[in-house]
Amino acid sequence: MSRARANSPRAHAYPPPHKKVINVVMLTLTGLCALLVVSVLLFILGYLVWNGARSLSWNFFTKLPVPAGQTGGGMANAIVGSAKLLLLASAIGVPIGVLGGVYLAEFGKGWFSFAVRYTTDLLNGVPSIVIGIFVYTLIVIPQHHFSTLAGGVALGIMMIPIALRSTDEFLRAVPNTLREGGLALGASKAQTVVTVIIPAAMQGIVTGIMLNLARVAGETAPLLFTAFGNQFWSSGWNGPTASLPVVIFNYAISPYEDWHRQAWAAGFVLLSGIFLTNIVARLLVSGRRSTSRS
Amino acid sequence: MASTATTPPAPSSAQDAPEKLSLLEKFKKGDEAAFLITFASALTIILITCLLVQRLWADSALSRHAFGWHFLASSDWDPVNDQYGALPFIYGTVLTAFLALIIAVPVGMGAAIFLAELAPRKLSNVLTFMIELLAAVPSVIYGLLGIFVLLPILRDRIVPVLQGVFGFLPIFKGAFYGVSYFSAACVLAIMIVPFIVSISREVLLAVPQSQREAMMALGATKWDVTWKSVVPYAQRGMAGSIFLALARALGETMAVTMVIGNVPSITASLLSPGYTIAAVIANEFTEATGDLYVNALIELALVLFAVTMIINALARLLMLGMKSQETAH
Amino acid sequence: MATSTPPIELRRLARARTARFGDPEPLDTPSQPQFTVEDMNFFYGDFHALHNLNLTLPSLRVTGLIGPSGCGKSTFLRTLNRMYETVARTRVTGKILFGEANLFDYAPTLLRRRVGMVFQKPSPFPKSIFDNIAYGLRVNHLCSRSELHDKVVHCLQRAALWNEVKDKLNQSAFSLSGGQQQRLCIARALAVDPDVLLLDEPCSALDPIATSKIEDLIFDLRRSCTIIMVTHNMLQAARISDYVGFFLQGKLIEFDAARKMFQFPSNKLTEDYITGRFG
């Protein structure tokens, strides 16, 4: 009797052994899934560093491309082109997105707010190639030529939805007590927003913009029929311009060995830039979280 | 002594007549101005989106009038004779996207469950960070790796094995040169996995702790708790993440263009080259001559737009249901 | 039914403020009205939150508003600087005079400059201590750049915070303790030289020592500023109020000098509440 009682906790032990086995098996399986996904990243990084850094030279940053078949040359024009496109894109996407986000978080209510949120999600889901077509019909057809301007507008439109949603979210995370604190001192709503709320959310908003830039920096499809490409320097905003992603695409599908090498180098440069921006942006946010806690 | 400077009102001066703001002062305080400026920005977004739909609709008019609904059902894509049918591209788009989902969903879900529920917090944070980086890799880089790394591996290692085992199936018949539906689906799968993982992980983390505690109190294993109480609770949100991933896969352009082979045909074999809507636009748009040709391509963009919109809307609907469910508890 | 008297402690407090040495006597001599409220009703959408309020709040006195949570005392406080207008679907009917002028004739920003408010949770802006105090002066363009520093120093001295923060004016306001943050918020409100200071349970998030410092500050301010304070702490109301208003379920049950109310409440409900018989 006493023996049976002593054994009973063991006999009725929960979980039963087969459940424990399942537990371990599933832990391993799902862990392998995660490992698989992460190993893809490590593979991509490793491969690009290996192939790209090897093909990288000073010429890459300073020289223009050479005609097909010759070796050497670089992508100075594409790097500058990408920078110009991003500058233009931020000039369009950031103000509209951020101000729209301020509207949603601070002023908006009712059906119009809902409509703005809904369209923003819609615009965010539009495939990038469709944005390319849109800007083509909007700017390239009336102008009769490809241009940096069109490329910048295309990327800018792609930046709007994310800039808006991230601004909206970070502003909403600012505690309401700060809004009331500002108003209670005789500041108007606009003054409170500009002098208290936006500064309080600034780091978050900047992070959002950085991630946003990193995202559109790699966009290729919307540039194919807007900024197009260019073997030479593109001066001003009205001519077609080369950009890193489009050059990678064109070089990768070309039959020339040397161009493939250059594509790897360009891919390495592009990805390094994107990853660095991502890492800095995320550190900015996590750093802020830890200081506000202390 | 009469100074014009306004002195701060003495405590008893509340009896003064109320001061009213002049129009100029009102503008300085800025409420109306701020409202108008931000409202204009918000309105711009709606206008841009409306304009986008209007342009796609208007600039595909020729093609819509010439082919009507037949455009979607015809598999005849012949620029020389100005005959355009979208079926091969629709077929390729849908086939590659679903194939990608079949590969990506189990892996993505597994990884999400591991990161959200089973892994130690620190490990999970590191892995999540890496997966978010993976989501930031541009599609042209995937294409680059697809051409030079994935295609040779598929051609030399994986497909011969697949054909050896499943060669009797029509989907694995035929010669394999590398570029194919299957290759495109593999690249797409790799591209959408990070999205599935990060969205599903967030959905899982949003499941209230009480859901877990109830079963833990009964002494259930971690997997039991996850599978029987957390996952069912998060089902809708996870389904939403699959829809979002599907929308991305359908609209993906560069990587697919680089590995699918770009042949407008409809074949049962996954190993033969094909075409997708986005890829045909990317490849042929700048070279398209003739208004009808351009219009047909823009109509393809319209179709792609409509499809991704519908799928995105479905995804939002599922996620929305998820959110109201959370607040109800 | 024989009326039971309030607990001995409350009575003593109300009679002679002996709880802490040096606490001044209640000031219930007549004074000018600061706010005159007539037939005021307040609605949140369809919910009728305040019913037919009629009262006169005296100037340069400390008025305590007491009552169980949800009774509408904070809502009432928020109508006095029209802060309720930031919440959607709220509506006020009736008449409120600020001094002798209609409250609703003021531009909200001007009104709020003259009727300052401090909230339950300390809410310093994520700026330096100096910038927190200077904020109200700057947005209202109340003083020149050269005067700013002196004004800030003066405010901090007035709020008895100067000695604690004089060496770290440029540090973040979050480096202060909770009680210091709350006094900073009071100093911030004082910077624009308001006629009235509304305090919405300013001590509910603070420990007893920080609370007593804020109470000291309120005593110091009452000569220069009308103070209206919501509190859920009866002892605190008895300690610092000159006048007390008791709210219950959106109605003003009783309004009287603190000395009288805590000793001889005229309403049975008030008596039940201050003797702790409900809630």
Image (tube, grey):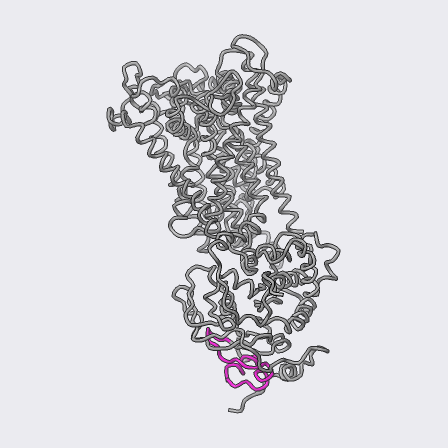
Q: Which of the 4 image quarters holds residue A280?
A: top right
* Residue A70 placement (x, y as % from top left): 55, 8
Look at the image and say whether residue C123 sits in the magenta stretch: no
Question: Which residue in the rendered view is the most extreme toward the bottom?
Answer: C2
Q: Which of the 4 image quarters holds residue C259?
A: bottom right
Q: Nearer the viewer, residue B196 or C108?
A: C108
* Residue C249 placement (x, y as % from top left): 46, 74
Question: Which residue in the rendered view is the most extreme toward the front?
Answer: B1
Q: Quadrant of the N terminus of chain B?
A: bottom right
* Residue B170 placement (x, y as % from top left): 36, 20
* Side of C152 where B24 appears, left or right: left
Q: How many marks?
A: 0
* Residue A267 placement (x, y as % from top left): 56, 23
Q: At 27% from the left edge and 25% from the top edge, which residue is drawn?
A: B62
Q: Is residue C49 visible?
A: yes
Q: Nearer the viewer, residue B83 or C117?
A: C117
Q: At 57% from the left edge and 38% from the top edge, which residue is drawn?
A: B128
Q: Is residue A256 above or below residue C18?
A: above
Q: Is residue A132 above or below residue A181?
A: above
**Residue range (magenta):** C247-276
Q: Is residue C217 above or below residue B302?
A: below
Q: Is residue A3 visible?
A: no
Q: Nearer the viewer, residue C121 or A89?
A: A89
Q: At 63% from the left edge and 71% from the top edge, which residue is drawn?
A: C224
Q: Which of the 4 image quarters holds residue A29?
A: top right
Look at the image and say whether residue C249 sits in the magenta stretch: yes
Q: Nearer the viewer, residue C192 or A61?
A: C192
Q: Is residue B65 above or below residue B124?
A: above
